[in-house]
Image (tube, rainbow, N blue to C red):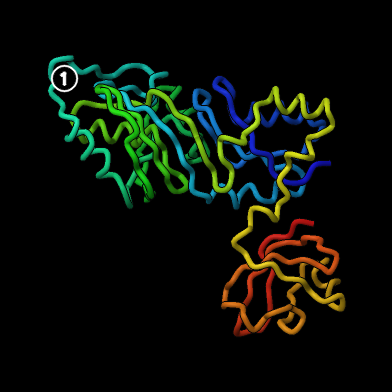
């Protein structure tokens, strides 16, 4: 069984669920899960977790994500991208009067904290029903705005009525909705014309593998070479080795007293630690509690 994370390139036409289903067949392993959906038309980085690495799925969804998106001004659709039904199409003459500086200012004004209303065509649930299921049934329900953060926003190319930009954003941000909101602020409407997810945490698009490449690696018995071990995603956490006397506590996911930890005097309160035994085996992530002088388990990966 494989344990860890694989950086997969999701191609257009596949849902994230499709990718997981195909990987189960390719790798002959059932315990596989993805770390956050990408729209079927979108492409790019989809970290996929295997075996004990599936315990990372909920943690990795919190990572910042980077996208390259194309905004098409002058169009509004029910899905907020070009796959939907057109609700509004701007006249060419008023659209042609838009100044590049005006568009630039409107886009960059979304930097920072931003209250975003989730789109109807999304997997969010209201009263147990997914919003896209309600939308397909012709129903629209009220959605509460959610606070998201646009951490970086860079215009890469502007050839009106289209704008290509790079965005780094927090968990829960819909780029389709960002495009829609930019168009609404400009008064001409806007939709997302294309989307590439170029980075999720430590995983970049340059190293992402297509399903056909993963099949080749399987045939060459090299899939293990591209599985990133779970502890690799916690590089910002201090590595700690426990003494052999308390390894049993670690094996059972129990609290570890400070005196059994190396360099405990250097730890900060609530600091997260990568826990290993003397053989270098990774057990999980712990959090140090200075007042109690102990480390407590956060997530175990045995």
Q: Is residue 234 visible?
A: yes
Residue 270 x/y as whole percent: 57, 73
- Residue nearest the observer in this picture, 129 or 20: 20
Q: Is residue 109 left or right of residue 229?
A: left
Q: Residue at left 25%, top 19%?
A: 88
**In the structure shown, which secondary structural element does the residue marked by tag 1 occupy?**
helix
Count of number-bearing discs: 1
- Residue nearest the observer in this picture, 78 or 170: 170
Quarter containing the N terminus: top right
Q: Is residue 49 left or right of residue 15?
A: right
- Residue nearest the observer in this picture, 227 or 185: 227
Residue 296 x/y as whole percent: 68, 72
Residue 221 x/y as whole percent: 84, 32
Q: Residue at left 66%, top 84%?
A: 293
Q: Is residue 298 above or below residue 213?
A: below
Residue 56 x/y as whole percent: 66, 50
Q: Is residue 146 visible?
A: no
Q: Residue at left 73%, top 78%?
A: 262
Q: Residues within 10 Å of mark 1 (few under 14, many from 20)?
A: few
Q: Is residue 131 left or right of residue 44?
A: left
Which picture quadrant has residue 164?
Answer: top left
Q: Is residue 49 above or below residue 292?
A: above
Quarter containing the C terminus: bottom right
Q: Is residue 172 above or below residue 273?
A: above
- Residue nearest the observer in this picture, 122 or 108: 108
Disc 1: which residue: 96
């Amino acid at each position: 069984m494989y344990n860890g994370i694989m950086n997969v390139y999701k191609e257009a036409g596949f849902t994230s669920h499709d990718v997981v289903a195909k990987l189960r067949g390719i790798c002959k392993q059932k315990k596989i899960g993805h770390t956050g959906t990408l729209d079927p038309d979108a492409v790019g980085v989809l970290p996929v977790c295997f075996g004990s690495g599936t315990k990372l799925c909920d943690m990795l969804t919190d990572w910042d994500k980077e996208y390259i998106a194309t905004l098409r001004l002058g169009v509004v659709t029910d899905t907020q991208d070009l796959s939907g039904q057109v609700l509004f199409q701007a006249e060419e003459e008023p659209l042609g009067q838009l100044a590049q500086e005006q568009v630039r200012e409107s886009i960059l004004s979304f930097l920072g904290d931003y209250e975003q209303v989730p789109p109807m065509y999304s997997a969010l649930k209201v009263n147990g029903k997914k919003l896209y299921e309600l939308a397909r049934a012709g129903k629209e329900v009220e959605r509460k705005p959610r606070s998201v953060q646009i951490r970086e926003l860079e215009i890469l190319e502007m050839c009106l009525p289209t704008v290509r930009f790079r965005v780094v954003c927090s968990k829960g941000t819909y780029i389709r909705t960002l495009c829609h909101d930019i168009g609404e602020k400009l008064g001409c409407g806007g939709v997302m014309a294309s989307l590439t997810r170029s980075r999720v945490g430590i995983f970049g698009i340059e190293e992402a593998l297509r399903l056909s490449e993963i099949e080749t690696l399987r045939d060459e018995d090299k899939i293990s070479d591209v599985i990133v071990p779970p502890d690799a995603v916690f590089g910002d956490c201090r590595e700690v080795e426990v003494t052999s006397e308390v390894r049993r506590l670690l094996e059972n996911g129990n609290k570890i007293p400070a005196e059994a930890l190396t360099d405990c005097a250097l730890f900060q309160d609530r600091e997260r630690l990568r826990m290993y035994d003397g053989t270098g085996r990774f057990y999980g992530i712990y959090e140090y509690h200075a007042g109690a002088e102990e480390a407590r388990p956060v997530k175990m990966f045995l």
